[in-house]
Amino acid sequence: METVVRLAARGDGVTESGRYVAGAIPGDTVEGDVISAGPYRISSVCAHFGICGGCQLQHADDVVLADFAAGRILGALAGVGIVPETVHPTHLSPAGARRRASFRLVRDSGGVRLGFNIEGSSAIVDLVECPVVRPALWAAACALRNALAPKLRTGHAVGMTLTETLSGFDVLLTNLSLGAADVGALAALASEAGLARIATETSAGVEIALQLAEPVVRFGGVTVALPPGGFLQATADGEAALQAAVLEGIDGAGAVADLFCGAGTFSLPLSARAKVFAADAARDAVAALSASAKRTNRPVTTAHRDLFRQPLQPAELGKFDAVVLDPPRAGAKTQVEAIARSKLKRVVYVSCNPNTFARDAKILHDAGFRLTELWPVGQFRWSVHVELAAVFLKG
């Protein structure tokens, strides 16, 4: 008999001898193929757990979830020889908090399925519930499934992303065309289900099919118009935790560059304390941020700029007291290499990928930066996806 001592990156239990056991969590014991429950195992809350690929850890309590999130990050950093000076307690988002989710709609012989992929498969789980997302978002998704079902032929798969905003749900549909008659039929549904906008995305780009209200969000007390399908942190509480970490990390800085800024998740809160230069490759998001900053007289200067191909160079970086980075999962290697060559002394890095974060942290570490503070964040409750904020100081 062996005891499970930790979770691997994809959620499998790992025993003292290094054996990987699917479905086991720390504290469980394993003998052969039999898992005996330990003190941290709980009952799952969803009928689809174990089949749906959206959640991997519903059988683990908050102690395990928090340790897993921190361990994913610390393990990746240990692999490059870095130990943070201070690790803050993990922030975990509660159940039913997801305000943004991407589902798939597929018609097969059994009808139209709405859900996520089965773990390790391209097949779709036909969900009857989803305790991860906000109840109103789930209700809106179900209403859209019923309304769009007549348009789907057998084998037809449609992507459907819903984002909760202050003025209603923003809906982005992929691989689906809507005619005038479809839009007319959806108008009544939109009003009933609280849909602010429905847009479609094809190879030709994004087109707004129906808009009852402009979807807006609020960052740092400033209202921003969200572009169709625009990025928003998965939960409001997770966003607040990351914003608080970023603000603490740049405390005292008078001029800040917010790179990979999106629509202003960090730029607008930062602008209450510092002058901000914000850059991103997402043109519509940058335009929305710029418009909101101008309307409210916030000290934010924006640039539409592909930071992978055209990172800020050392001379440009020298104008700032601190840089905030919030790159996609690929990380920010090229930009971090430029930071390493600059005179910059402070970097606050927000990441959704511990592995690319560790790679970039190694570049900063080798250039003389210390990783002084780390905040693990588990926004995607019960999943193996982990986010973080970190502060690097030099000198």
Image (tube, grey):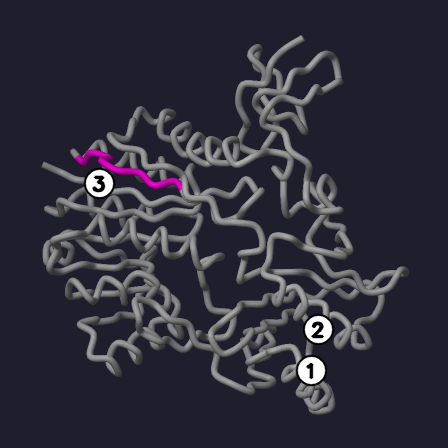
**Image spot of residue 140 (x, y percent):** 66, 71
* Contact between labelled residues 2 and 3, with CB atoms less than 8 Å apart: no
Q: Earlier in the sequence, mark 3 or mark 2?
A: 2
Q: Earlier in the sequence, mark 1 or mark 3?
A: 1
* Contact between labelled residues 1 and 2, with CB atoms less than 8 Å apart: yes
Dividing the picture into quadrants, the one containing residue 208 is: bottom right
Dividing the picture into quadrants, the one containing residue 200 is: bottom right
Q: Relative to residue 265, is residue 170 drawn left or right?
A: right
The 10 Å Cα crowd at callout 3, few under 14, some 14 to 19, many 20 or more, is many
Kind of residue sitting beneath label 2: Leu
The C terminus lies in which quarter of the figure? top left
Magenta stretch: helix, strand or loop mostly: strand
- Location of mark 2 (residue): 144
**Image spot of residue 220 (x, y percent):** 30, 67
Q: In what element is the residue under mark 3?
A: strand
Q: CA distance from mark 2 to mark 1?
A: 8 Å
Question: Is residue 254 one of those drawn in magenta?
Answer: no
Q: In what element is the residue under mark 2?
A: helix
Tell me: residue 143, above or below residue 393.
below
- Location of mark 3 (residue): 392
Report the magenta residues as a range: 369-376
Q: CA distance from mark 3 to mark 2?
A: 45 Å
**Image spot of residue 171 (x, y percent):** 59, 73
- Location of mark 1 (residue): 189
